Amino acid sequence: MNTSPVVMEGTYDKEKKTLTLAGEGPGPNGPATKYKSVTDTPDDNTEVMTMYMGDGKDPAFVVTYKRKK
């Protein structure tokens, strides 16, 4: 883990309700690494954020947020 921030920029697609961000920052082992975050909103009560690192082939992690009812 690293305490340095990763600055990312991107776009929001209103039709698909998808926020896509990309940036570069320190990697887990020190050298600079590329990052990509994709946040989908499938419904009014759910958001799914998928984070990619490095080559971006497989997700580093996926977080699903659900609104508390």
Image (tube, rainbow, N blue to C red):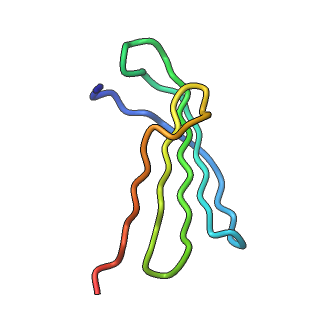
Q: How many marks?
A: 0
At 59% across and 39% down in the image, what residue appears? 22
Relative image position of residue 56 (x, y in whole percent)? 60, 33
Left or right, 58 with reference to 47:
right
Q: Which of the two residues, 66 or 15, is positioned nearer the viewer here?
A: 66
Q: Which of the two residues, 68 or 59, is positioned nearer the viewer here?
A: 59
Relative image position of residue 44 (x, y in whole percent)? 49, 82
Vertical placement of 10 versus 65: above or below?
above
Residue at the outermost right position: 15
Residue at the outermost bottom position: 69
Left or right, 44 with reference to 21:
left
Q: Which of the two residues, 14 or 28, is positioned nearer the viewer here?
A: 28
Q: Which quadrant is the N terminus positioned in? A: top left
At 47% across and 61% down in the image, what residue appears? 48
Relative image position of residue 67 (x, y in whole percent)? 34, 78
Left or right, 23 with reference to 62:
right
At 52% across and 38% down in the image, what residue appears? 52
Residue at the outermost front position: 58
Q: Which quadrant is the C terminus positioned in? A: bottom left
Relative image position of residue 31 (x, y in whole percent)? 45, 12
Vertical placement of 26 versus 58: above or below?
above
Where residue 16 sits, quadrant-wise, is bottom right
Left or right, 3 with reference to 38:
left
At 56% across and 73% down in the image, what residue appears? 42
